[in-house]
Image (cartoon, helix red, strand yellow):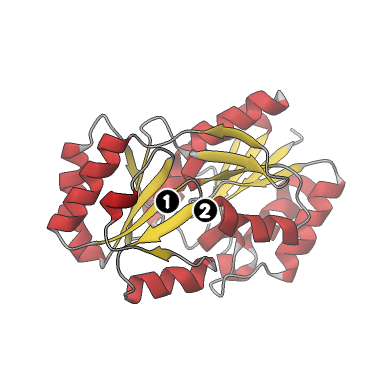
């Protein structure tokens, strides 16, 4: 079956650990595009953070960002935006405060933090986005919340994850792209929902899609796509649910999929 759309996660999937696109991945994506395959991103990153990689690859397609909360093309056209409710965001901020957990608050594709700590610096380096440091996140909370991201050591996040799950059961979708992240978005938002929307736009069926990812926020789209692919560096339970397991992100695992299932 000829695949017509390739949806790629970024961190741990398309990007090497140094946050760059390898030459084999770049060449394979170009070859797929030359054959008429639509290549897009499906990432938890901010739109403005994903955009630089899309431009690097000369993409002109809608990008699925914030785990599906914002779908926006490289020319700036917004296709769909689904914001977290203010009550849900306030609850997440309050719980993070109780446990003294670092928060990244994303509002209309801007990043707000209330402390300039190690986590702020790490995120700044990995995303190439400069956050706005404010005294109180509650004071800047406004409609248009793309995502609330809690960041901390894996063990300290375990009880927080449980509390969030209880308090936000019907108000949010809680997922993770990293053991040090808890990502909170609108309850109807996921990478699957974003991909499903794009299929309507392009009049395609899921069977025509390859989706590649490496973590729990990728699982819905991996199960949804005609060919769901997990990276070798994905957790074991993610790999177990994929249709195919490719190589590691540092070994051009994306190019391996393109060469095997699109170009061959």
Whether residue 145 is situated above or below residue 198 in the rendered picture: below
Secondary structure of residue under mark 1: strand
- Residue at 16% x, 38% y is 166
Q: What is the x, y in percent for residue 41?
A: 62, 48
Q: What is the x, y in percent for residue 76?
A: 68, 44
Q: Earlier in the sequence, mark 1 or mark 2?
A: 2
Q: Nearer the viewer, mark 1 or mark 2?
A: 1
- Is residue 239 visible to the viewer in this orientation of the structure? yes
Q: What is the x, y in percent for residue 66?
A: 48, 46
- Which of the 4 quarters of the picture holds residue 60? top right
Q: What is the x, y in percent for residue 165?
A: 21, 41
Q: Nearer the viewer, residue 212 or 125?
A: 125
- Residue at 62% x, 69% y is 251
Secondary structure of residue under mark 2: loop
Whether residue 207 is situated above or below residue 45 in the rendered picture: above
Whether residue 223 is situated above or below residue 112 in the rendered picture: above
CA distance separating discs 1 and 2:
8 Å
Q: Are marks 1 and 2 in contact (CB under 8 Å)?
A: yes
- Residue at 54% x, 35% y is 194
**Residue that extends furthest to the right in the rendered view of this protein:** 34
- Residue at 57% x, 29% y is 196
Classify mark 1: residues with Cα within 10 Å, few (<14), some (14-19) or many (20+): many
The residue beneath circle 1 is 106
The residue beneath circle 2 is 46
């Amino acid at each position: 079956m000829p695949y017509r759309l390739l949806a790629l996660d970024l961190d741990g999937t398309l990007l090497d650990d140094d946050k760059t696109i390898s030459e084999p991945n770049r060449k394979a994506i170009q070859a797929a595009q030359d054959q008429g395959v639509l290549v897009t991103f499906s990432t938890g990153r901010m739109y403005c953070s994903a955009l630089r990689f899309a431009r690097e690859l000369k993409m002109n397609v809608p990008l699925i960002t914030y785990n599906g909360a914002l779908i926006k093309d490289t020319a700036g056209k917004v296709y769909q935006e689904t914001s977290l409710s203010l009550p849900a965001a306030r609850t997440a901020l309050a719980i993070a405060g109780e446990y003294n957990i670092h928060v990244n608050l994303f509002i209309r594709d801007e990043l707000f933090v209330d402390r300039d700590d190690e986590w702020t610096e790490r995120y700044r380096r990995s995303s190439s986005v400069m956050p706005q440091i404010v005294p109180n996140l509650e004071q800047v909370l406004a409609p248009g919340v793309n995502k609330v991201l809690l960041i901390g050591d894996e063990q300290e996040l375990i009880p927080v994850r449980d509390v969030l799950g209880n308090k936000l059961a019907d108000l949010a979708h809680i997922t993770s792209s990293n053991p040090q992240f808890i990502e909170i978005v609108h309850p109807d938002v996921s990478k699957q929902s974003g991909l499903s929307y794009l299929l309507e736009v392009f009049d395609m069926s899921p069977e025509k899609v390859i989706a590649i990812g490496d973590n729990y926020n990728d699982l819905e789209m991996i199960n949804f796509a005609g060919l769901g692919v997990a990276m070798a560096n994905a957790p074991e339970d993610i790999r177990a649910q994929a249709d195919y397991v490719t190589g590691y992100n540092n070994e051009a695992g994306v190019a391996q999929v393109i060469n095997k299932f699109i170009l061959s």
